[in-house]
Amino acid sequence: METYSVELAASLALPFEVTTLVLPGRPDGRPPSLPSYGLFLFKAMVYCLLHGRGFSHVVLGDLILFPAALCCRLVRKQRRVVVVYGLDLVYGQRKGLLPRLYAAYFSLFRACQGLFSSVVAISTCTADLARKAGLLRVETVHPSLPATPLTNAGVDGVDLPVHFVRARRRILQFGRLVTRKGALWFAQNVLPQLPDDVEMFVVGSAHGYDDLDALKSCGRTHYLGPMPADMLAALIRNADAVIMPNIPSPAGAQDVEGFGLVAIETSSLGGLLVASRLQGISDAVLDGVTGLLVEPGDAAAWRQALTRLLDEPMEQRLRRRAIAQQQTHEHYSRQRMSDSFTKLFAATQ
């Protein structure tokens, strides 16, 4: 959500003059507390009442802020758009008090959705979930490639981990470890079927990940922990394959991959990506161009796809890297995101 909002503001700044209202996260990286959300919503409502008359377009990056759109409507009949994400649409189905309260709030949002000329979903999967949840006028606009230390990392002067350097063929998975990302499933079900010289390297935070010990105990599997952006970029560029072996969330977890930012980060750096054809990941991979999509949970299909990729001649692999990098920068550009919203605004005048 935060990345999409940052990129959206930068994209809209290309054709428009943009004013942003931002709720900062906490210093340790955790999301804001519920009281902070409530205070920010109050501030946004007051701002919209006082200044909403000066804006012809209003974009809400979080549906929780929808009362601010009502305040804008009270002072001017402008075009309003709200962005929704995968978790927005499934969180209310979880068990517990907070999900029940959120479900009630979402019902109120759904009843007030006439405030918005469009509901923007970040992927086809998210758009389908939005329509199933009863939302109308849903359009899909993909995120643009974020300008971050990772995607802007240089290529020289990085010392790679010793285990990575010594391995003959390397498979990399990166990102925050959660069960649905499939690292343990891959290490247990796919890696043993690959040639003995193939090793798996996992990078990312394991905070709250219950399967870390089981993952570390898998043969030919190395957990490297979080890493600086320049080193991670070097790992992506030097890996023989980067994987996103996502699997459906465990029963009752009610979580989805809204888009799959790791996919476009990988291909933008020329990484050789193999990913599950699951949820929003399918929108983040141009199959056969910026990566390969494989059926989730199908160990035989994963083995076949990776074996073909690992055995390709070097010239073909270099060509894959160059094409993936070029096409990612073109297809997921800020200009394309800007054009999509500009057309959306024009269509709802």
Image: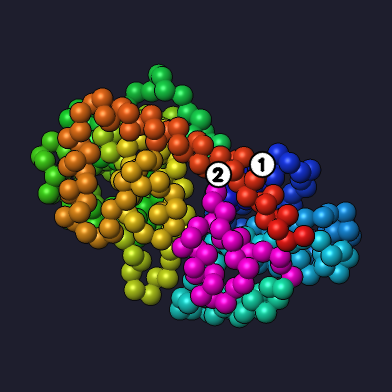
Residue range corresponding to the magenta coloring: 115-143
Verify whether residue 140 appears in magenta.
Answer: yes
| Disc number for residue 10 | 1
| Residues at circles 1 and 2 in contact by the CB criterion of under 8 Å | yes
Residue 142 appears in the rendering: yes
Colour mapping used in the image: rainbow
Residue 331: x and y in percent read 50, 41
Mark 2 residue element: loop
Residue 104: x and y in percent read 61, 80
| Disc number for residue 144 | 2
Residue 160: x and y in percent read 32, 27
Q: Amino acid at mark 2?
A: Ser
Query: Who's the residue at 76% across and 65% down the image?
Result: 68
Verify whether residue 40 appears in magenta.
Answer: no
Q: Amino acid at mark 1?
A: Ala
Query: Badge 2: few (under 14), some or many (20 or more) residues near its Cα, within 10 Å?
Result: many
Query: Badge 1: few (under 14), some or many (20 or more) residues near its Cα, within 10 Å?
Result: some
